[in-house]
Image (cartoon, rainbow, N blue to C red):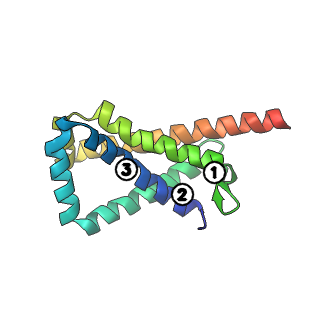
Amino acid sequence: MDHDLPFLSSELAKIIEAGIERELNQSVFYSPFRLFYRLFKKANPSLIQRVREILADDIQGTLINAEGWNKEVFINEKYLSDAGDLLIKKCYNIGIRLVKNRLSVKLAFKVMINRNLQQEIYNYILNQVKAKTEIILKDAAVNATVIS
């Protein structure tokens, strides 16, 4: 399968969601929210898909705007490089940390209805993706310099 930039962005959006769902499934405290979240996703599949697409587009823009952006660091020919796999893992952890460190059960429900909180969480995700990308790019540049 071809791993171009839109594909990478889409995968990152899916893996962040997977990290969020993993953490929701790990805690009994999130059970009421988890039930609400699953019912909402089941009742609104087209809305959820649209949100995923928007997030993927914004992640793509975030990647391109990352300092030192170089697609070849993450995509080697047609496949993910080791750095691409590392970014996938880091994005999975972004989803986990979002639930673990930023969302209480009460706040999770508020995010569903409060636009300001939605924007805050969305910005947090994009900022984390950018920060993790820039760390990987910096490490790749250092490694390339050492090898040369």
Task: Indicate the position of residue 138 as horizontal and vertical percent values.
Answer: 66, 36
Task: Indicate the position of residue 118 as horizontal and vertical percent values.
Answer: 27, 46
**Residue that extends furthest to the right in the rendered view of this protein:** 148
Task: Indicate the position of residue 43 as horizontal and vertical percent values.
Answer: 18, 65
What residue did someone put label 1 on? 74
How far is mark 1 from mark 2, CA to CA?
Answer: 9 Å
What residue did someone put label 2 on? 8
**Tag 3, which secondary structure?**
helix
Viewer-side label of 3, 1: 3
Query: Which callout, 3 or 2, points at the residue further toward the start of the chain?
Result: 2
Q: Residue at x 60, y 63 (%)?
A: 4
**Tag 1, which secondary structure?**
helix
How far is mark 3 from mark 2, CA to CA?
Answer: 15 Å
- 1 and 2 marks in contact (CB < 8 Å): yes
Q: Amino acid at mark 2?
A: Leu
Depth order, front residue of 82/131? 82
Side (left or right) of 40 relative to 14: left
Q: Residue at x 58, y 52 (%)?
A: 64
